[in-house]
Image (cartoon, rainbow, N blue to C red):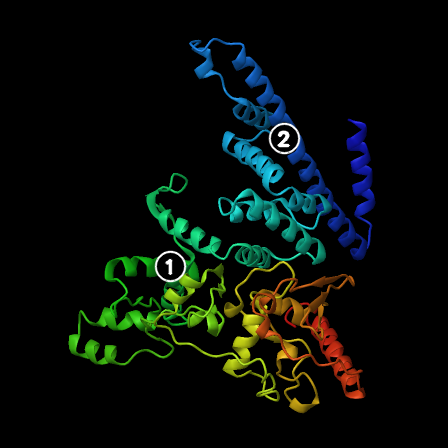
Amino acid sequence: MSAGLLDLDAAIAVDVSRPADEVIELIAHCASTIAAAQYRMMHLVNRLHDVRTDDWVEDMAERFADDPATQLTPNGTEQTIAEIGAVTNVPVGTARATVQTALRMHSRMPFTGQVLGTGRISMSDLRLILDGTAGLFDDAQCDQLDRRLAAELSARPPMSRARLRALVDFLISQIDPEALRRRRERAEQDRSMDIRPDRFNPGMSRVSGSLAAADAAIVNARLTDMARSVCSADPRTMSQRRADAQVVLAATGLGPDAILPCRCPQCTKPAEKSLEAPAAAATEDAAAPAGHASASSVVNVHVVVNLSTLVGLDEQPGYLDGHGVLDADAIRRLLAAAKISMINPADPSVGEHRYRPGSSLDALCRARGLCCDFPGCTAPAWRGDLDHTNRFDRRHPRAGGATVGENLKPLCRFHHRIKTFTGWRDFQGEFGEIVFESPTGHRFLGNAFSGADLFPSLRLPSRRARPPTTADERQRERILAEREAHEAWANQPPPF
């Protein structure tokens, strides 16, 4: 056994006895070490490519023009791909992607690559940046984007991929407002749909394709609406209902006949009776079962855009929930026949003593969040919950935890449960920053880039934080006591 493996086993033997706070620190250290190693590997791959390319050029210079080997000899890039595939034991496609990433990072995004070396972004983040900026700029614009993006990423805490994508597109729109339009037009040209047998699952077929973001949002929303239109007793999963809805759409189109039949016993019972008593079946079918709602032909998508852009006074981009930043033309086309709601950030206190916010405040908080505010999460803002940072007191609504913009944020259902029923805590600062504190005491900024960065008018009026009062302390003690009681209840043996 090698000395390195023995040292690693010894370190792991120590790690299993470490407390949770030290474990978190070590996990963060490992993630940073991986990023630094990948950054170094990208430079090494680039160096190997230079060596193999120089060797290939010299070899070609020594050959005669009519030498058949001149046309058959792999070039420097191909030789590099072969060596990378061998040393990392990966297929040709994976090795080619690694070499291309290294070359693009070195030639187009060297400063952003340095951010990878510091561990502030991951290799998948770097690939997202490189893919999102490919073919949009000339060298001078790409250098400007590289410097600005590296500065932004170095100045901000790590952010989720949805926020990173929005930050990149926001900077692209500032450097070249037409770049997003060109990317959208290219995406529309590359649209495709493919259906082929699934070689891993006999009897099944695999559907894959690419659509422009605005078109994909419409299809996705329509499938979701149809899947949710059936009874709660329907035995199918959401994925199964969406798949069935796609078949219905293919057969009926987007018209009123595009209704997903429910398969719960109550809804299928009239159809079974129709063989014996058609008249009775018709009577029963006229009344929809309780909890069953027909899918509407209206497609629900959520877009945030400045009014000035909507009426054509400027070309600032908009944000499509769940899909990211889109150019102004795509947004205006998407909203040509849509219902538009105005967001008024100057009136954040409407309904502050009610648990559920009004529609305007709800839209403001989700637009400002862009996505789930938990660190690293990319769940769309309009598909989750609105969480009170300071818990709403249902018995005494005026005692604290008001339903106002400074106390609300979007969280997906998973992270809403994590925050409510575990040791996680969160704080909402004066400038809209949302900080989460883990059970080990580590703090993370959830919204390093937010809708207020994309749309400055969404910023709430600044309010100086007041010192905690006795009522605040009592509420805090009550919340902690309730959580301890919940933990004690959850830890009881059955039957509770």
In the rendered view, would you say 84 is above or below 343? above
Q: Nearer the viewer, residue 60 or 436?
A: 60
Which mark is on residue 370?
none
Would residue 40 be found to the left or right of residue 306 on screen? right
In the rendered view, would you say 206 is above or below 330? above
Q: Earlier in the sequence, mark 2 or mark 1?
A: 2
Residues marked 2 and 1 touching at CB (< 8 Å):
no
For the point 35% across and 75% down, which residue is it? Answer: 293
Residue 109 in the image: state x and y as whole percent.
61, 43
For the point 71% across and 66% down, which residue is it? Answer: 436
Residue 16 in the image: state x and y as whole percent.
79, 48
Which mark is on residue 45?
2
Residue 251 in the image: state x and y as whole percent.
24, 59
Label 1 secondary element: helix
Determine crowd level at label 1: few under 14, some 14-19, many 20+ residues with C-alpha closer than 10 A.
few
Q: Nearer the viewer, residue 15 or 103?
A: 103
Disc 2 versus disc 1: distance between alpha carbons?
38 Å
Label 2 secondary element: helix
Q: Is residue 411 visible?
A: no
| Residue that mark 1 sits on | 215
For the point 46% across and 55% down, which residue is it? Answer: 178
Q: On the image, which quarter does residue 1 sit in? A: top right
Residue 248 in the image: state x and y as whole percent.
29, 61
For the point 71% across and 81% down, which residue is it? Answer: 463
Q: Nearer the viewer, residue 99 or 427?
A: 99
Q: Is residue 313 visible?
A: yes
Look at label 1 and name its amino acid: Asp
Look at label 2 and name its amino acid: Val
